[in-house]
Structure formats: C-alpha cells, structure tokens
Amino acid sequence: MHATIRPQPGILDIALYQGGTSKIAGRDEVVKLSSNENPFGAGDMARLAYARAGHDLHRYPSTDHASLRAALAAHFGLDGARIICGAGSDEIITFLCQAYAGPGDEVLYSQHGFLMYRISALAAGATPVAAPERDRTTDVDALLAAVTERTKLVFIANPNNPTGTMIPLSEVTRLAEALPARALLVLDGAYAEYAAEYDGGAALVDARDNVGMPRTFSKLFGLGGLRVGWGYGPQHVIDVLNRVRGPFNLSSIQLDVAEAALGDSAHIMRSLSENARLRDWLADRLNELGVPTDRSFANFVLARFASAAQAEACNAALLADGLIVRQVASYGLPEALRITVGDESACRRVAHVIAAFMERQTLAEQQG
Ligand SMILES: *Cc1c(COP(=O)(O)O)cnc(C)c1O
C-alpha cells in the first residue's frame, strides 16, 4: 500500500478473482473443466460471424446495441427497450453496484454466492453482506433476516454457482415481494438456459419494478472469451445503468458474434441435450462412488468429499491425469470440487480417475 496515494475505502479489501486454472506445468494436453465453459466451444455461426467482423475493424460500433437487443428480445420474448448489454454479465453486475450502492450501503448475497458480488460491492465502496444458505441452497428467510435499512442490492444466482442448486420461482417471488421498497433484487441467470422450463425470472422482471436479471453469452452460448453479457430490468433501472455504461463498451465483433450465436439453434440444442445427459450420468456415477452431489440445474456438478484433505487429494489425482477442475475453498466449500460437465470422453475420464482415487482411499482406510 502506498503511504500517501490511497484508493477509495474498500478497494484494498478486494481479494483478486482467480479464474479457473487452464494449465498444468509440464503437460501439453489438458482438459479444462474449471470455468463452466461449453465443451463444444462456440458454434459455427458465431465463428463465421467472427471471421466476417474482421472486415470492419476501422468502424466504431453502435452505441445503443439496437441490433443485438432486438435479437435478444425476439429470442427470449422480452421487451428490447429494457435490455442493456455489457462486457460479460460481470460488467452488468459492476454497473448495478456502481449505480445503486456506495459507502454506507449494503450489498446482500447468499453464502456461497458468486465472488463478483462481493468484489463489485467493495469496488463501489459498499459493504458486502453474506446470508447463510440451507444445504447449499439459497435460503430466502435467511436473506430477509439479513436485510437492514442500508440494504440496496440483493444478489442471488439461480441456478447458483458453485453449488448448481436452484430455488423455485415461487421462492424468488416471495423474496422480491418481501424486500423493502428501496432494495433491488438481482437475479443472476448465468445458467438459466440450462434449467428446463425456467425463464430466468423474466416474467417476474416484467411484473415488478424491483427485479433485474443479468444474463450471459459465456456459458451455454460458448463465448466466455468474447465477453458479452446483458441485463433485463424495469425501465427505470435500465435508464440508470445506461448512464454509467461507456458508449462503446462492446466492440462490433462482440455485438455481431453474440447475435449470430443466438441464431444457432442447432448448436444450442446440442449443447443443452448433451449437457443434460452427461450431467446426470456424471452425478449418478459419482454418487455410486460415494461422492455425493446436489442435483445440479447448471453445466457443472459440485462433488462433495469427506474432508478438505480428501478433496485436495482428489484434485491432485485429477491434475496428474490432465484434468483441471475447480477448487472452491474461496467460496467456503473446501471439501468440494466443482466439475464442469465436459464432453463424453472428459466425463468418463473424470469418473474413471475419481473411481480409482476412491478405491485407494478405501484400501488405505482398511489398512488403517
Ligand atoms: C459465469 C458466471 C457469470 C458470467 O460471467 P460473464 O462475465 O458473463 O462471463 C455470472 N454469474 C455467475 C454466477 C457465473 O457463474
């Protein structure tokens, strides 16, 4: 810390976000299952749009993102005037904290919530507050009990990362109804597309003036490296966020490729069906091996081990085989590993390594 040139309060309390590891020293071929990326990558239509976008690099992008917003509105059945686009949904989360929370205000989220809520709250000078979960699941009563007169924003991800669990819309609605009038509920829908029959809370956004919904192209649409997210909310919120948004926050490449990805229904369908099939297969297999998971509604499973030491040892065994999963001690879950649902061969390799690992554990116990 510098002796005299000091940042705003809160900023030095931020622990830097650690992205999912992507390399293993001394190994060329690895399978990365640590960042919930789409194992099939971007779809063909997105790749084609990316190649085409190279022709117009000298042009400034649109400032109002009208074309992408119209495509999102048509795809998800929303009002395009109440959509805002950002550099990943991270940027939407940042805008929300910047616009609605400052020194003296509280930003509330659930215990194992996404790390960006805390980081963005601190960056805005606000106080982050975590409410307990019940069985690794968002607990509406605990959140309501943690509300104070200073609460300005309440973040929940549904389905949640890193737990994969979700709460029913009736519970989300109960939370929205019970919050004080000055607090905005933010329903992070990064994994909403993976949950069957779930609109991410869009109808709730339409019905109320205190609910917003950030979404992303980083997961199902396979564009994590491109950085495109969006948010849907009441008009008064979108109007506020557009004031803090830089006019050229998205490049023409980001806008064109994201729009193309929305139209690639073959890639979307394949990604969804393979994820559902392999997620259930992996969860069942882990369960048989004595490694429980909660039912996941997303594109990863949270594998729970007997102890932090066992999770650590299993992580080492996976790494030795070139498989990178996510340790989630920074989310308060040191005894668990978050495993992205990869393609079929990746899932089989994960199950194979964990089976061998658990067998060695049992033998070691027997030899006592
Ligand atoms: C991955 C993820 C996001 C998306 O982040 P982007 O900035 O859009 O890549 C948002 N929220 C949660 C809970 C996530 O896991």
Image: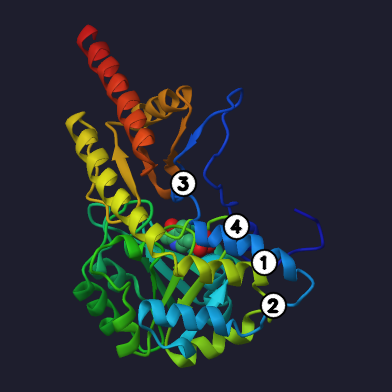
**Amino acid at circle 2:** Pro
**Amino acid at circle 4:** Asp
Mark 4 lies on residue: 13
Q: Residues within 10 Å of mark 2 (few under 14, many from 20)?
A: some
Q: Position of residue 159 (x, y in %)?
A: 32, 61
Say which of 183 and 290 sits in front: 290
| Mark 2 or mark 1: whose residue is earlier in sequence | 1
**Amino acid at circle 3:** Ser
Q: Position of residue 74 (x, y in %)?
A: 41, 82
Instruction: Tell me: is circle 3 under 8 Å from ligand 1.
Output: no
| Mark 3 or mark 2: whose residue is earlier in sequence | 2
Mark 1 lies on residue: 53
Say which of 125 and 16 sits in front: 16
Question: Distance from label 4 to label 3 (Cα)?
Answer: 15 Å
Question: Distance from label 1 to label 4 (Cα)?
Answer: 40 Å
Mark 3 lies on residue: 330
Residue 207 vs residue 20: left or right? left
| Mark 4 or mark 2: whose residue is earlier in sequence | 4
